[in-house]
Image (cartoon, rainbow, N blue to C red):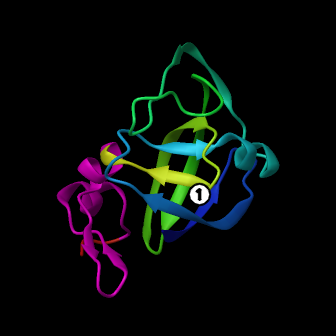
Amino acid sequence: MIKVRIRGSDGTEQATTALVDSGASENFIDKAYAEASGIRMQRKTASRQVLTVDGSEVAGGPVTHDAQIHLAINHHEEDIRLHCITIGNAPIILGLLWLNLHDPVIGWKNHTVKFHSDHCAKRCLPSSP
């Protein structure tokens, strides 16, 4: 779990946490959290099934909505689209799609996340690391 700041379409910024999960194929936001936080959700043109690690469908059924937010982790900032699902134990999940794009260096012992990739130097950070 990492501390993040998010801002939805209404411009309100709030602090929350995100689970960095290499077992999740994509990026998600909890539907109930999004609704309670006033984050606008958009209906997808086609619903998508999301499966858990045991192959069963996630609680709440297929993904019918997504949300566009601004996400900040310290000085790292980006606009990101998240699939809206029922998560329950974390407001946001940053999955393999996010990990592959940003290629962060995770310090497991010290609980740190550092961004040194070319992608982040060009698009997510105020200055190159």
Amino acid marked by disc 1: Ala
50 in relation to 99, above or below = above
Quarter of the figure with residue 91: bottom right
Q: Which residue is the site of mark 1?
A: 90
Q: Residue 112, percent across and down?
A: 35, 80
Q: Residue 84, percent across and down?
A: 60, 36
Left or right, residue 95 beside residue 129: right
Quarter of the figure with residue 127: bottom left
Residue positioned most to the front: 54
Q: Residue 1, percent across and down?
A: 48, 68
- Is 30 magenta? The answer is no
Residue in the picture at 44% in, 30% down: 51
Q: Residue 36, percent across and down?
A: 81, 49
93 in relation to 48, above or below = below
Q: Residues within 10 Å of mark 1 (few under 14, many from 20)?
A: some
User: Residue 26 versus residue 7: which sits nearer the camera?
Assistant: 26
Q: Secondary structure at mark 1?
A: loop
Which residues make up the magenta segment? 97-126
Residue positioned most to the left: 118
Residue in the picture at 29% in, 53% down: 99
3 in relation to 42, above or below = below
Left or right, residue 9 beside residue 121: right
Which image quarter holds the C terminus? bottom left
